Amino acid sequence: MNSKTLVMNALIAALYFIVTVFVAPFGFSAVQFRISELFNHLIVYNKKYFFGIVVGVFLANLVVSPMKTDIVFGVAHTAISLLIVIFIAKWVKNKLYLMLINAFVFSFNMFIIAYMLKFFGDLGEEVFLVLWGMLGIEELITMVIAIPIIIFLNKRLSFEKLVY
């Protein structure tokens, strides 16, 4: 990894962390609204953003999450989802379509977080599907709202060219 890519990933991790801390009262409650999830769309522009996003999630969950198991499960959810999107990007070249796919992949994979909450929250089996549905819908809404923001920012910053 060259120095420019390393610096950009460090910046992404820091921004993810700062935005997550800023919205922490809404990001770790029963209704989760994490605008920092918009950084997940950077993977659509360049797969080299993978490490910055994952490190940002790790740091945010380490410091802010009330459940320290979120460090493992949250990072796993993000890494798995990003890897799926990187794989799909081999065939889908349209950035808007890929961001929509990204939103659905992250939303579907919220079963990982739902399982964590059910298991470590000692909740009943019937709660899992409700949690998964709620978390998935919240993630989908957040990531779909983030699409025009990322498109707007990309017009000014050219995310594809910031790392190489």
Image: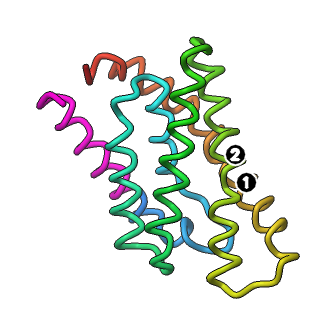
Q: Quadrant of residue 63?
A: bottom left
Location of residue 161 with respect to 78 vertically, above or below = above
| Residue 136 image label | 1
Identify the residue at image location x=66%, y=84%.
121
Location of residue 153 with respect to 131 vertically, above or below = above
Identify the residue at image location x=67%, y=79%.
119
Residue 121 as seen in the image, left or right of residue 7: right
The residue that mark 2 highlights is 140
Q: Are marks 1 and 2 in contact (CB under 8 Å)?
A: yes
Q: Quadrant of the N terminus?
A: top left
Residue 159 as seen in the image, left or right of residue 116: left
**Residue lying at the far right of the rendered structure:** 126
| Residue 75 image label | none
Circle 2 Cα neighbour tier, 10 Å, few/some/many (<14 / 14–19 / ≥20): many
Q: How far from the left and from the top, in percent, is residue 40?
A: 49, 40
Circle 1 Cα neighbour tier, 10 Å, few/some/many (<14 / 14–19 / ≥20): many
Give the residue type at disc 1: Gly
Give the residue type at disc 2: Leu
Residue range corresponding to the magenta coloring: 1-19
Query: What is the image's colouring?
Result: rainbow
Residue 130 as seen in the image, left or right of residue 30: right
Which residue is at the front of the view, 1 or 140? 1
Magenta part, dominant SS: helix
Q: Was residue 94 drawn as part of the magenta stretch in this picture?
A: no
